[in-house]
Image (cartoon, grey):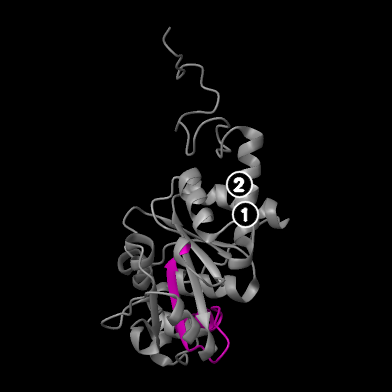
């Protein structure tokens, strides 16, 4: 790996003007890997059960590494996504407000991405502080930041067009599971649960990539910066996000005073 996780985090935050730390997500199915993680990291655990997107608050806003197991997860959406709960009538009925009828609710709930059985624990951490290879990297960002990430991911991995996977009421949890299972990037709006529980108070959107695609994406960003003079695609030469004005507007122009 040519770049460290700390270097990649710095580049992403500096060039894309991210509000929050990128979140490294790790799904642990092996107790030996958990034991090694605990030796290598100072971490926090939930005091009470909460949602997966609330775990992520500590990582992206406070820079804390959070490790949690099933008893620390109080959200049935993420319990189903992580394979820690079977899909039952209660889970199906909780989706009735989104759909036409109960049959559609069941079909939609059962079509959500799910992890394979055997998950022991989950880590969410600020990208720059990890000593493990993340399964996914989750960005809470604005629309134009997500666009730049998507463009660089498509170019770096030679995938086009990018196809989002949006599910009802499980953006952060099922969104990460989809990326883990399919090894494809995902972009999706906050769901009704994560918008409130996950504190997406700025109206942030989600952009998630497989962990193994992180360095190619960052390298592509740096190549583009060298070629264009800045990381901005919308206004090459300006620091991202650049001036929020029409691309070639002849009226909003400034010159250096002599």
Image position, residue 80 (x, y; %): 46, 85
* Residue found 55% across the figure and 32% down from its top: 235
Q: Relative to 205, say whether 75 is above or below.
A: below
Q: Are marks 2 and 1 in contact (CB under 8 Å)?
A: yes
Q: Nearer the viewer, residue 186 or 1?
A: 1
Q: Position of residue 71 (x, y in %)?
A: 35, 89
Identify the residue shown where x is 51% and y is 50%: 12
Q: Position of residue 54 (x, y in %)?
A: 34, 71
**The image quarter in which residue 153 lies:** bottom right
Label 1 neighbourhood size at 10 Å, few (<14), some (14-19), many (20+)? many
Q: Which mark is residue 217?
A: 1
Q: Which residue is mark 2?
A: 221
Instruction: Give the magenta-colored segment's residue range.
Output: 102-127
Q: Between 246 and 108, which is closer to the camera in this rendering?
A: 246
Can residue 116 be seen from the camera position used here? yes
Residue closer to the observer: 68 or 162: 68
């Amino acid at each position: 790996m040519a770049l460290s996780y700390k270097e990649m985090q710095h580049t992403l935050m500096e060039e894309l003007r991210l509000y929050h730390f990128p979140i490294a997500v790790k799904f642990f199915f092996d107790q030996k890997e958990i034991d090694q993680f605990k030796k290598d990291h100072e971490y926090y655990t939930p005091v009470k059960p909460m949602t997966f997107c609330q775990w992520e608050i500590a990582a992206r806003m406070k820079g804390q590494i959070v490790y949690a197991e099933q008893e620390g997860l109080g959200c049935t959406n993420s319990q189903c996504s992580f394979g820690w709960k079977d899909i039952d009538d209660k889970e199906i009925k909780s989706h009735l407000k989104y759909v036409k009828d109960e049959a559609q609710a069941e079909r939609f709930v059962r079509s959500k991405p799910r992890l394979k059985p055997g998950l022991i624990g989950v880590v969410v951490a600020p990208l720059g502080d990890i000593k493990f290879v993340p399964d996914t990297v989750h960005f809470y960002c604005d629309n134009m930041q997500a666009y730049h990430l998507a463009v660089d991911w498509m170019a770096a991995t030679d995938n086009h067009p990018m196809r989002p996977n949006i599910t009802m009421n499980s953006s952060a949890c099922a969104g990460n599971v989809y990326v883990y299972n399919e090894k494809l990037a995902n972009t999706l709006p906050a769901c009704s649960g994560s918008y409130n529980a996950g504190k997406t108070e700025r109206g942030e959107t989600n952009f998630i990539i497989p962990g193994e695609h992180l360095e190619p994406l960052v390298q592509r960003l740096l190549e583009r910066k060298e070629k264009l003079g800045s990381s901005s695609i919308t206004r090459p030469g300006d620091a991202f996000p650049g001036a929020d004005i029409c691309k070639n507007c002849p009226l909003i122009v400034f010159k250096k005073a002599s």
